[in-house]
Amino acid sequence: MAQTSMGYPATLEIDYPARNLNRLTSFFRIFVSVPIAIILALVAGGGGQVGWGETGEKMRWMFGSGVGITFLALVLMLLFRQKYPRWWFDWNLALTRFSYRIATYLGLLRDEYPSTDEEQAVHIEIAYPNVEAQLGRGMPLVKWLLAIPHAIVLTLLGVAVIVGTIFSWFVILFTGNYPRELFDFVVGVMRWALRVDAYAVLLITDQYPPFSLS
């Protein structure tokens, strides 16, 4: 499968809550998230944090002793062997899904506690690339540079997301509902960030990410 059904080889959908959100856990969300955030930190390993700031909380590590996103080793593998080992892809995909479930929970979009392995309400699809046909050998060396405009825009959008999340926190406490327009906006920013991650960090495509929330 070279492309997802949405056209770009990385897609994200998050189900809007069908019931009122839990006001108590929403109030204490930053505290109840600590255990699962520690697990993510242990799995991802210590080292450089990478991310595009779409929620202010999404965590991504690329360095460490054989853990985290296998970025540097993958750059070398693509550059010299033009290969993307399937088990590296599966690991990167699983860790990406896990981190986005935690970001969804921290961002108050859902109140199911993040699972380490189940999809829950966060649906991420990333296509495994045909390396020889779809990935240029030297592209990993320049993608970080080409992604800078996205990083700038996403940083600005991330500020708006933080403000919107704080506003939504108050709304949830009083009504139990996450405003639908803000929900769609936050998910759109996360979707945008996922495409940039797929391009510049996961290195699964040379297709430049669109500047779009949809």
Image (cartoon, helix red, strand yellow):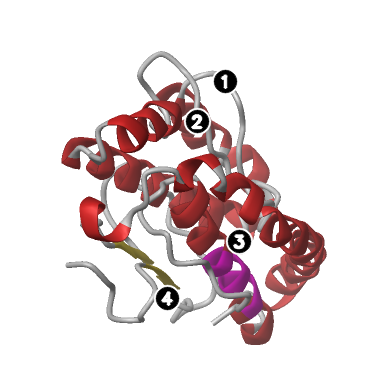
Coordinates of residue 201 in the picture (x, y in percent): 49, 45
In the image, farthest residue toward the top: 65
Cβ–Cβ under 8 Å for marks 2 and 1:
yes
Q: Earlier in the sequence, mark 2 or mark 3?
A: 2
Q: Main secondary structure of the magenta part?
A: helix
Circles 1 and 4, Cβ within 8 Å, touching? The answer is: no
> Is 144 left, or right, of 116 in this rendering?
right
Quadrant (top left, top right, bottom left, bottom right) of the C terminus: bottom right
What is the span of residues highlighted in magenta in the rendered image?
185-192
Q: Which residue is mark 2?
A: 62
Image quadrant in which the N terminus is located: bottom left
Q: Which residue is mark 3?
A: 108
**Counting other residues with Cα less than 10 Å from the Cα at mark 3, is it few (<14), some (14-19), or many (20 or more)?**
many
Tell me the kind of residue under disc 4. Asp
For numbered disc 2, what is the local secondary structure?
Answer: loop
**Residue 149, x across and y down, in percent:** 72, 60
Q: CA distance from mark 4 to mark 3?
A: 13 Å
Q: Is residue 186 magenta?
A: yes
